[in-house]
Structures are given as C-alpha cells and as structure tokens.
Image: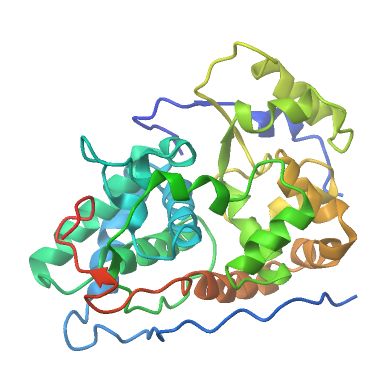
Amino acid sequence: MSLSSSSSLLFIPLFYLLLPLCWGGSSTYTSPRKPRYQLTTDFYKNTCPHVDQLVASITSQQFQDAPVSAPATIRLFFHDCFVQGCDASVLISSKPGEPASEKDAEDNREIPVEAYDTVSKAKQLVESKCPGVVSCADILAMAARDFVHLAGGPYYQVKKGRWDGKISLASKVQYNLPRANASMNDLLKLFNSKGLSLEDLVTLSGAHSIGFAHCKHFVKRIYGTDSSMDPRLLKSLKLSCPPYGGNIDVVAPLDVMTPFVFDNGYYLNLEAKMGVLGSDQTLFSDARTRQLAQAHARDRNKFFQAFSESMERMGSIGIKRGWKHGEKRKVCSMHA
C-alpha cells in the first residue's frame, strides 16, 4: 500500500528496522455528560436513507487512491470534536480580513489535504442526491468511521443529527487539543472537560494505530532525559530526526509495527516501550491507565468494542441543533 500524498510527507520505515523485536484494578472516572441533543442512527431515514452508502462509495475509493486519507480523516474528526464540538467547524476556510479559522491553526495545518478532499467529495455526492439535508458534521463522522473499518478496525453505526457550526476560530484550537508530551494529569483534565472518561482517553488513543507524527512532536523527547523508549526505536528516530534543522516533512508512524492496519498493536508497542509520543507512552507508564492499556493489548475484540463506544461518546460532544446555534452548509468549507 502506497502512502502517496499531495502533502509530500517523508515516511520513516521504522517497522522494517524493528521487526526482530517482540511485543512482549478498575479505574474511576467521571461519567460522560449526556449531550443536550440526542443523535439517532436513523435521523435521515426519510430524507436521505442511503447516506451511509453514498459516503462509503467515496471513502472506499479514497482509501484505494490515497491511503493517507484514513489516518488524516480520523484525526480531522478528533480535532473537530475537541474544539467547540463535532460541528465541522474545522472544515471552514479562512477569509481575508477576518480572524483565521480552525483549519489554519498550527495543529491543523499538518493534516493532509486528502482528509478535506474526502469530506468535500462526499458532500458533493450527497448534495446531488439529497440537497440541503445532510450536514458536513455528520458526513465527517461517517467518513471517519468508514476509514477505521477500511483499515481493519470495527464497523459501528454512526448516530446522526448534527448541525454545522457557525463559528470557527484558530485561536480556540491549541488549548483544546492534547499536546504530544502532555502529562497524564493534563490529558485527564482535558478529556474530562469534554465529558470523556479515563477509559475514553485510553481507548481513543488507539486511533494512533494508523497515525503519523512529524519530528517536531517528539524530537525533544528523543534528545531529552526521557529513558522510557526502546533504545533501538530511539536510534531509528534519531537517524531521521536531528535535534535541529531537520526536514519538516518527515513523519514517523505512531504504531511502528503495523502502521497501516487499525489493530491493537499500538498497545503492544507501549508495553515494549515503543510509544513514539510521550503522551502515548504515559498510558502504560502511569498506573492509572496501565491496566486498561494492557487489557486492550491482550484482547483485540474488546478493544474494538470499546473503541466503537468511545467514538460514539466523542461524536456527541458539543452538538449543535437549529438555526440559532447551527447551520446547514452546501459547501463544507464555507458558512451557509
């Protein structure tokens, strides 16, 4: 499978270097808040009954033509939901003379264009069959689900009924997304602020099974005093990521063993001290999350079930409904 992308990313083939390696109590949490508006799987039953199939026809072709679309779109959905809720505000393009939109925030500029292309193509197709009915926010949620499944992960029903957001500000992004070297306390505080639990934190992090990271997100870790990384992985990363002046397009897979397959290998990597990001490795090094990370490493099916449930909870963050708080866009990059 090729990682061809118009983003011109340079992939570090760490899994080839590391193939000889072997993978070698209940948590307490705050219950997620119930969304103000309830979503339903059959929201478009009468207005666009085949919307899932329409979106799937686009995602399946995108996955074949540009595999990077999968991790990129899943990441795009996470970034959308964590900043002002799942309302497709991340898709809005900035306008000259106005405050920059979320899309132009530093954290989102790294997301490959294929993610935005996927949603745009799906929206165009859906609009041709069901004009003015399906929100961009729902299309993004369905596309993320499709790519999880296409990459080998679970297929789950996406609840729908989101409206698109009317506000998109780059200034809202940075402090609403996890940092690459965040501490466990910071991660738990952030997830709790979104109505998500410790279990959701550990489980949703499994999306890094097919994710990638630029050197700048882990370069301080590999040249710092952190000794929680396998020395062979550390050596491999240093070969492609110098402490200063490296190629900004170089990326490393967050799952160094099966980077193109959505599975539970990510958690096996953490056990073997092969987490690339500090915020990933802390899931295993911190006693509060280690037990669940180990459980996901041992049972792929239970991880898949938990991931499906956590994606549903995340997909319910900050739901907009009605013209006072939301809009229905015809073009996902432009406000209605």
Quarter of the image where one finds residue 222: top right
Measured along the vertical axis of the image, is residue 104 above or below residue 33?
Answer: above
Judge by depth and name the residue closer to the eye, 287 or 292.
287
Q: Position of residue 185 (x, y in %)?
A: 78, 57
- Residue 264 horizontal side relative to residue 330, left or right: right
Residue 290 image point, x, y percent: 85, 61
Examine the rendered structure and indicate whether residue 144 appears above or below residue 179: below
- Residue at (40, 84) in percent of width and height: 37
* Coloration of the structure image: rainbow
Q: Report whether residue 261 is seen.
A: no
| Relative depth, front residue between 118 and 170 | 170
Query: Which residue sits furthest top?
Result: 245
Exactly how many numbered labels are in the figure? 0
User: Considering the image in quadrants, where does the C terminus appear?
Assistant: bottom left
Q: Residue at x 68, y 72 (%)?
A: 197
Quarter of the image for residue 256 reads: top right
Q: In which quarter of the image is residue 93?
A: top left
Please tell me whether residue 97 is drawn above or below residue 76 in the rendered image: above
The image shows residue 99 at horizontal and vertical percentages of 31, 41
Q: Residue at x 68, y 58 (%)?
A: 264
Query: Horizontally, is 300 left or right of 224 in the view?
Result: left
Q: Which of 83 and 300 is in front in this view?
A: 83
x and y percentages locating residue 276 in the rendered image: 71, 38
Quick check: can you spot residue 95?
A: yes
Q: Residue at x 31, y 47 (%)?
A: 116
